[in-house]
Amino acid sequence: MNEIVLAGIVLALLVVLLIARTSTKTRPTDRDFEDLGDGAVDEIAEEDLEAELAELEAELELEEAVEEALEEVELEEPPAPVAPPPSRWARGLAKTRGALGSTLKALGLRDKLDGDAWEEIEEALIRADVGMDATDRVLEALRKENPSPDELHDALQKELVEILDAGDTTLHTRPGEVAVWLVTGVNGVGKTTSIAKLGRRLKDDGHSVVLAAGDTFRAAAIEQLGTWAGRLDVHMVKHAPGADPGAVVFDAIEHAKAKKIDVVIVDTAGRLQTKTNLMEELKKVRRIADREAGGVTEVLLVLDATVGQNGLAQAKAFQEAVGATGVILTKLDGTAKGGIVVAIQEKLGIPVKAVGVGEGIEDMETFDPDAFVEAMLS
Ligand code: GDP
């Protein structure tokens, strides 16, 4: 106990001594100065002055920095409003925009639209994949109208919208009854993906859906559709590879009737259209679907927008075999030049009912002629 008290006293003494030493060091007394020579006093005074000067300089620098920052805040422009991200439409049409938009802007600055100007418009339309027939039609109408350079943009917009606005873009179901949607197109155009997108859209709209694996020619096609059916959480009717696609469609319609399902989406084979037996097969599938369900409400032809004008020959063959109520134009987000939509409408007279703008199940847009042409000409 005594030892602890003793240790405490020693410790307290040490602390007092330490404090006394520190205070005498930081604040020199007169006695200290007397003890020192003149040179040492000068040195200490100089050191103190330097320290004070450094302190003042630091303060000044800080003040200046604060003032500068304040000035910058006052001078800075108010932040520009953030532009909304370009729509999927606009992004999908990036290539076309380059071809038509820049030509139109340049021509808009001319004094008048002469022969050269018309040639430039023609070239730009063809470059944008509008195709010869539609280009001729548009040019003829424009020449008749004879717009001034600054009226050209609106005049062209009007003509293109007129061509594109011609058809019914609704995807029809049959309230209270089974509707069948046949989906056709050559392999690789995006048919299976489009079926999944359509299924998703129908489900979002509150409809029930069943998928029919009608491309029995390729085992991989059945598998791929099955994967989408799983993701969509819808039933898929399938038979073994090589089976009669008509039988698959028949079963799918029976299933839909029994379960009161609104829409049967049928995948079909897509071997090249030059093979007559494919077209015969499709005709048979359509006949069965019509007979069993009492009416196919949609025959959708899937076309790959990046294929351009070549796709039109395919489209004609499918249209002749099974008829087509509408086109689904895929891959518009790729290197596609949007003008192909105008060419399709002009040549086939089938409305483009939906466009694919990506690989995801959500990446399908309803075709909107006004928004489309606006993006094309921007
Ligand atoms: P199918 O053979 O006609 O059934 O074609 P698939 O549905 O298997 O599609 C072929 C390829 O095209 C796949 O890699 C798809 O992801 C892709 N694809 C389909 N639609 C689109 C689209 O709108 N945009 C893009 N970028 N790719 C697509």
Image: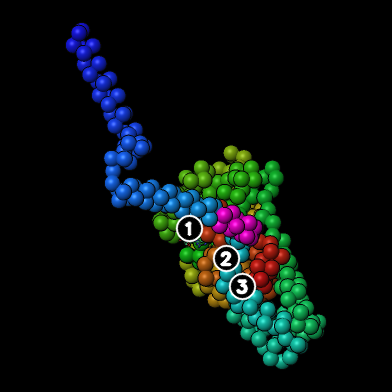
Tag in front: 3 or 2: 3
* Location of residue 228 with respect to 353 vertically, above or below: above
Residue farthest to the right, as pictured: 145
Q: Is residue 11 visible?
A: yes
Label 1 sits on a secondary structure element that is loop
Image quarter of residue 204 = top right
User: Which residue in the structure is indicated by mark 2?
Assistant: 92
Give the residue type that dot 2 points to.
Answer: Gly
Label 2 crowding class (10 Å Cα cut-off): few <14, some 14-19, many 20+? many
Give the residue type that dot 3 points to.
Answer: Arg
Tag in front: 1 or 2: 2
For the residues labelled 1 and 2, the Cα–Cα distance comes to: 29 Å
Tag in front: 1 or 3: 3
Give the mark, 3 or 2, whose residue is nearer the N terminus: 2
User: Which residue in the structure is indicated by mark 3?
Assistant: 97
Q: Residue at x 56, y 43 (%)?
A: 255
Q: Residue at x 63, y 84 (%)?
A: 123
Q: Mark 3 vs ligand 1: CB under 8 Å?
A: no
Segment tinted magenta in the rendering: 67-82
Residue 209 lies left or right of residue 277; in this view the side is right
| Along the viewing direction, whichever of 314 and 288 lies nearer the viewer | 314
For the residues labelled 1 and 3, the Cα–Cα distance comes to: 37 Å
Give the mark, 1 or 2, whose residue is nearer the N terminus: 2
Image quarter of residue 157 = bottom right
Instruction: Give yes or no for residue 183 being in the magenta stretch.
Output: no
Q: Mark 1 vs ligand 1: CB under 8 Å?
A: yes
Q: Mark 2 vs ligand 1: CB under 8 Å?
A: no
User: Which residue in the structure is indicated by mark 1?
Assistant: 215
| Along the viewing direction, whichever of 26 and 242 lies nearer the viewer | 26
Residue farthest to the bottom, as pictured: 115
Q: Where residue 326 sits: x, y (%)?
A: 64, 63
Confirm or deny contact between disc 1 and disc 2 (CB under 8 A): no
